[in-house]
Amino acid sequence: MSELLSRIPRDLANIVELVLKHNHWRDVETINMIASENQMSPLATILYLNDMMHRYAEGKPYKRYYQGLKYIDEMEVITIKLMGELLGTEYVDVRPISGTIANATAFKAFAGCGDKAVVPPVQAGAHVSHTRYGTLGALGIQQIDMPFNLEEFNIDVDGAVKVIEETKPKIVVLGASVYLFPHPTKEIAEAAHSVGAKLIHDLAHVLGLVAGGVWENPLKLGADIITSSTHKTFPGPQGGVIAAATKPDYKAISKVVFPMFVSNHHLHRLPALAVTAYEMKLYGKAYATQIVKNAKKLAEALAERGFKVLGENKGYTTSHTIVVDVRQYGGGAKAAKLLEDANIIVNKNLLPYDRPEDIKNPSGLRIGVQEVTRFGMKEDDMDQIAEFMKMVVIDGRDPAEVRAKVKEFRKNFLKIHYCIELTDPEAEKLLKLMLKPEPI
Ligand SMILES: *Cc1c(COP(=O)(O)O)cnc(C)c1O
């Protein structure tokens, strides 16, 4: 590589180097526990480099505005079918290029400027797109907070039903970016439907758990629409997806996603998404089951070492996420930075009892175990991670000292599990074909 770097202009070499440094740091040396991230399988990653990234396919398969799409049409149909099999509906749109765009589409399809939306509060983990500062606000839809029950770390059902009945919104949103336990879809769906509102359940964080069968599927419990990212617990390419329970709702969505929020839908992600969906059919159950075991174990291991882990009376979590209150150690900002210095990557997070103005230094850390699970970690490894975190945050050890231990530990987990394996020659050959196509 040094030959290439010395041959090309310095500014270009710098760009290449940044990518190589980033890849090495995050793929080889760090423990990655941002709850919204993951890694694609080797097959999905290589296929992601395909020529479809250069093309346009406005419209729907076989009803396009441009030529040159015969393979892309087939690819999109396969992707929709595979995602539909995982979600238990044939009404799937894979064109939203992100979870935020999926939300924008669903919100716009069922509510207009001046209408109301009842959503979980931000301190309880709602995504920015659910708020007046984000997508909801951009569409002129009014944000009305759903009451939240701190003890249960969940929506306060009676309170939420009351707010829905009183305010008569056009849409009600469930799902969050801090998601320890399933939101009460059934009860909220009944209340939403009683006032003629649509229930949109945002599964961005837990789509992989739903696909793996360890988290309830809101479409089966009365939700009208699910929106999601495709790259959090679901280990696909960055992108979005929407699924509807009924054909009329699907049609309403499809009319909005294009032409309103997407023209080119980033076609190269379709094969990667299809491969991921297929791999989830094969390995999703084992993967998702291990994620939940690991999350519970990490929560227990941290609590045993003196950390204040939320959701204790409910067993901490039934998802990939755990939440820790680190206020007594200087707050989330300080703890997250110290952990980063030790090569443990997590993010600071508001907790339900924080004030909105605490956003720069909230009380909490949000930790997700989906990516480390994908790299083959099991319960014992969660114990080790908890010990590393204690050394840094509670014992105040030098992060550089812990970093050396983390790098050593990470060496045992460099291979992605729960996917089709490629031999090195197979991977190299396939990669070469992405760059230099040949007849197959
Ligand atoms: C991450 C997230 C989104 C947005 O996803 P992007 O793909 O990043 O746009 C939407 N909703 C929730 C609950 C999320 O956590």
Image (spheres, grey):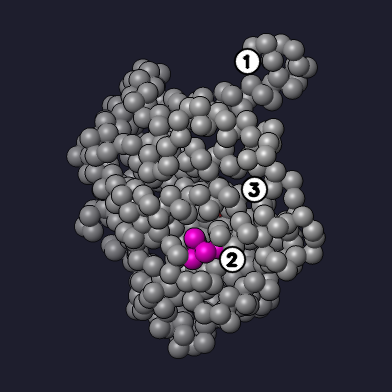
Left or right, residue 379 beside residue 432: left
Residue under the point 64% across and 48% down: 268
Name the amino acid type tagged 2.
Answer: Asp
* Magenta residue check for 81: yes
- The residue lying furthest to the left in this view is 304
Residue under the point 37% across and 26% down: 410
**Residue 227 higher or lower than 308, as above or below:** below
Q: Between disc 2 and disc 1, whose residue precedes?
A: 1
The percent coordinates of residue 62 (x first, y second) are: 70, 66
Left or right, residue 200 beside residue 98: left
Element under label 1?
loop
Numbered circle sitting on residue 1: 1
Left or right, residue 268 beside residue 359: right
Region of the chain picked out in magenta, as a range: 80-84
Residue under the point 75% across and 50% down: 55
The percent coordinates of residue 290 (x first, y second) are: 29, 47
**Residue 321 higher or lower than 328, as above or below:** below
* Magenta residue check for 208: no
Disc 3 to disc 1, C-alpha distance: 27 Å
Q: Quadrant of the C terminus?
A: top right
Q: Quadrant of the N terminus?
A: top right
Numbered circle sitting on residue 268: 3
> Foreground: 220 or 199?
220
Q: Between disc 2 and disc 3, whose residue precedes?
A: 2
Residue, disc 2: 93
Name the amino acid type tagged 3.
Answer: His
Element under label 3?
loop
